[in-house]
Amino acid sequence: DSGVTQTPKHLITATGQRVTLRCSPRSGDLSVYWYQQSLDQGLQFLIQYYNGEERAKGNILERFSAQQFPDLHSELNLSSLELGDSALYFCASSVGRGATFVDTQYFGPGTRLTVL
Amino acid sequence: TQLLEQSPQFLSIQEGENLTVYCNSSSVFSSLQWYRQEPGEGPVLLVTVVTGGEVKKLKRLTFQFGDARKDSSLHITAAQPGDTGLYLCAGEKNTGNQFYFGTGTSLTVIP
């Protein structure tokens, strides 16, 4: 158990709908990362938050948005869903203390999104 | 453009054989992690290497960080079916604690 929790574990919805994925980081971790993994593909970095502020953006679509709340949990919002958005969505957390500190990411169990 | 390239992409071997997976880049990283992922589950951290030339052993797994901190290798001795999975390397750059994942190596160990 990595200490990172994600809900829900599975989500089935229709095209055009909007969903919210939730992530709680490990105790003490300030950074949260979101990744997308499609079938037989590697991890695609979407976005990173550090202590409530957006720190880095990857290949995140404009239909997707995220935020990190004061209690450090994070939510990833996916709207106007398309069939191609079906994937595993992973959240990871790290201490994220800064440039001189060696950091490590720990991953949650993921949310499997199926868009029909 | 992928910052970290892994090879091979797919590997299928018999139980008991040895194998090496490579993770290469032209960039320097402050640290490098190796993860193992099973289907439908999140990546699980195996090791973090920090110092150039560092070697770490985890039972039958040996990890090495290149002297210039641009590449790494994972060697598995006497592979077992339980080693089957997707192996991912990830490099950390100092700026903003950002991580860059490799393309992944899918390993199948046949009993």
Image (cartoon, rainbow, N blue to C red):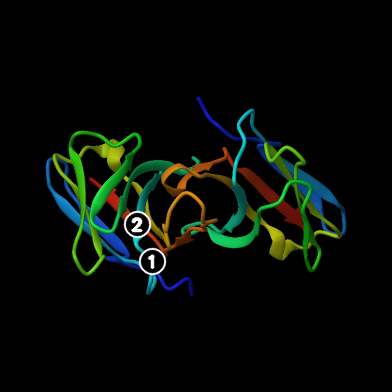
Q: Can you see residue B106? A: yes
**Residue neighbourhood size for the residue with mark 2, other residues' Cα within 10 Å, grouped as few (<14), some (14–19), many (≥20):** many
Q: Is residue A95 above or below residue B98?
A: below
Q: Nearer the viewer, residue A76 or A69?
A: A69
Q: Quadrant of residue B21?
A: top right
The answer to whether A51 appears left or right of B110 in the picture is: left
Q: Is residue B111 visible?
A: no
Question: Label 2 sits on what residue type?
Answer: Val
Q: Which residue is mark 2?
A: A32
Left or right for A79, reference B70: left
Q: How many marks?
A: 2
Label ID, residue A15: none
Residue appearing at x 18%, y 56% in the figure: A20
Furthest toward the front, the residue is A100
Marks 2 and 1, how far apart at CA? 8 Å
Q: Disc 1 marks which amino acid?
A: Asp
Identified at 40% across, 42% down, the residue is A45
Q: Mark number for residue A29?
A: 1
Q: Whole-percent x and y of residue A81? A: 18, 41
Question: Is disc 1 on the same chain as disc 2?
Answer: yes
- For disc 1, the neighbor class at 10 Å (few under 14, some 14 to 19, many from 20) is many
Q: Position of residue B16 (x, y in %)?
A: 87, 59
Q: Seen in the image, is B5 located left or right of residue A55? A: right
Subunit ID for the residue under disc 1: A
Which one is in front in this view, the residue at disc 2 or the one at disc 1?
Answer: 1
Helix, strand or loop at mark 1: loop
The image position of residue B103, as x and y in percent, is 57, 37
Horizontal and vertical percent for residue A85?
Answer: 28, 41
Residue B25: which quarter of the image?
Answer: top right
Front residue of A19 and A28: A28
| Contact flag, marks 2 and 1 (Cβ < 8 Å) | yes
Mark 2 secondary-structure assignment? strand
